[in-house]
Image: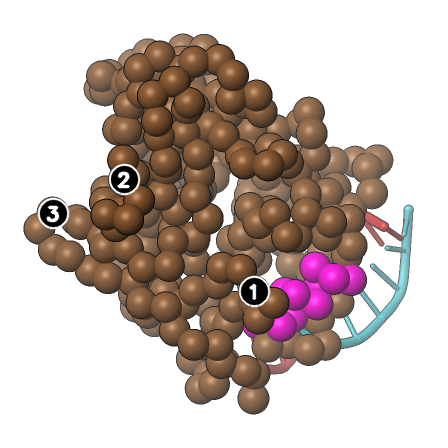
Chain colours: A brown, B red, C cyan
DNA sequence: TCCGGAAACT
DNA sequence: AGTTTCCGGA
């Protein structure tokens, strides 16, 4: 990793935390791992302050619009310490995702792309249950309204194998109105339908005591770690990246430590 | 604007 | 491997 340029986060206030090195590594393939573009896109998408720059497209789940291509490129360039970054280059990187099935282009709509949630298990939305057949609904990303609110899937008494009823998947709704029956702070994590869940390292986490009734999933590979705030009748809310929380995996406890901003050389 | 090949870089 | 850089073509 280049000294002085290890994953930097946004200076203009808000979240932005550096996760420990292992968060960017995979046991299977040692070596440092920088944030990937799609992680970054997701990150921007999740933050309200970038709504004017990039935002989820209402209606089509997983679809997002880059409202200000130059700005997104600038932010990406800053994150990767590539001052020469521009939308032309960034979009080339996005195009490489087509074959990987991470993204595809929404034809006809300018600057509009769509995530393939079928293939993607996002750290932010681990409850987007991907099971066998591709019956997965294109789960909705956070809604561009005040606080994005989610509903966990109806308490899944883990059905080992079969059943993949489309209706049973969690639906992330804008309203947050419908009562999601019993809540349930536990979400069953399932494997990716095909291929190894490669990058992902998941673990249950318990968030700090300051935030009661918080429970969710954390992943090691992403730059994002969120907690799910659930309250009965209210559904669940996705918190922004959590500054420091302790990850309890098996018995071990690991702490996330925010690191100071480091400028590009 | 968008696409994808090619080569270079880390 | 995942871009970054550059570019001819549609």
Q: CA distance from mark 2 to mark 3?
A: 21 Å
Q: Are marks 3 and 1 in contact (CB under 8 Å)?
A: no
Q: Are marks 1 and 2 in contact (CB under 8 Å)?
A: no
Residue lying at the far left of the rendered structure: A251
Depth check, mark 3 against mark 1: the one in front is 1
**Residue A212 badge:** 2
User: Residue at (36%, 43%) from the top-left corner?
Assistant: A227
Q: Is residue A130 above or below residue A161?
A: below
Classify mark 2: residues with Cα within 10 Å, few (<14), some (14-19) or many (20+): few
**Where does the C terminus of chain A fall, quadrant-wise?**
bottom right
**Which is nearer the N-term, disc 3 or disc 1?**
1
Q: Position of residue A70 (x, y in %)?
A: 78, 62
User: Residue at (75%, 67%) from the top-left corner?
Assistant: A86
Q: CA distance from mark 1 to mark 2?
A: 25 Å
Magenta span: chief secondary structure:
helix
User: Residue at (62%, 34%) from the top-left corner?
Assistant: A145
Classify mark 3: residues with Cα within 10 Å, few (<14), some (14-19) or many (20+): few
What is the quadrant of residue A60 in the picture? top right
Disc 2 chain ID: A
Q: Viewed as shown, does residue A157 lie left or right of A220? A: left
Region in magenta? A70-80
**Residue A72 badge:** none
Callout 3 secondary element: loop
Q: Is residue A171 above or below residue A248?
A: above
Return the residue at label 1.
Answer: A13
Work out whether disc 2 and disc 3 sit on a shared chain.
yes
Work out whether disc 3 and disc 1 sit on a shared chain.
yes
């Amino acid at each position: 990793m280049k000294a002085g340029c290890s994953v930097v986060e946004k200076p203009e206030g808000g979240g932005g935390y550096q996760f420990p090195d292992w968060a960017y590594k995979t046991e299977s393939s040692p070596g440092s791992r920088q944030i990937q573009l799609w992680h970054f896109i997701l990150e921007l998408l999740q933050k309200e302050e970038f709504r004017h720059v990039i935002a989820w497209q209402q209606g089509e789940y997983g679809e997002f619009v880059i409202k200000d291509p130059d700005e997104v490129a600038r932010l990406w360039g800053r994150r990767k310490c590539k001052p020469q970054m521009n939308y032309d280059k960034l979009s080339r990187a996005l195009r490489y995702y087509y074959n990987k099935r991470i993204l595809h282009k929404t034809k006809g709509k300018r600057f509009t792309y769509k995530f393939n949630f079928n293939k993607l298990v996002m750290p932010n939305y681990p409850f987007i249950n991907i099971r066998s057949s591709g019956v997965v609904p294109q789960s909705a990303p956070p809604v561009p309204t005040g606080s994005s609110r989610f509903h966990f899937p109806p308490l899944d008494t883990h059905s080992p194998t079969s059943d993949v009823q489309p209706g049973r998947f969690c639906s992330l709704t804008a309203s947050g109105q419908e009562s999601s029956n019993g809540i349930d702070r536990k979400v069953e994590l399932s494997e990716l339908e095909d291929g190894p869940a490669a990058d992902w390292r998941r673990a249950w986490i318990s968030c700090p005591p300051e935030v009661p009734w918080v429970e969710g999933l954390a992943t090691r590979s992403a730059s994002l770690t969120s907690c799910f705030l659930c309250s009965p009748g209210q559904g669940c809310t996705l918190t922004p990246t959590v500054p420091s929380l302790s990850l309890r995996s098996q018995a071990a406890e690991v702490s996330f430590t925010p690191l100071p901003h480091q400028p590009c050389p």
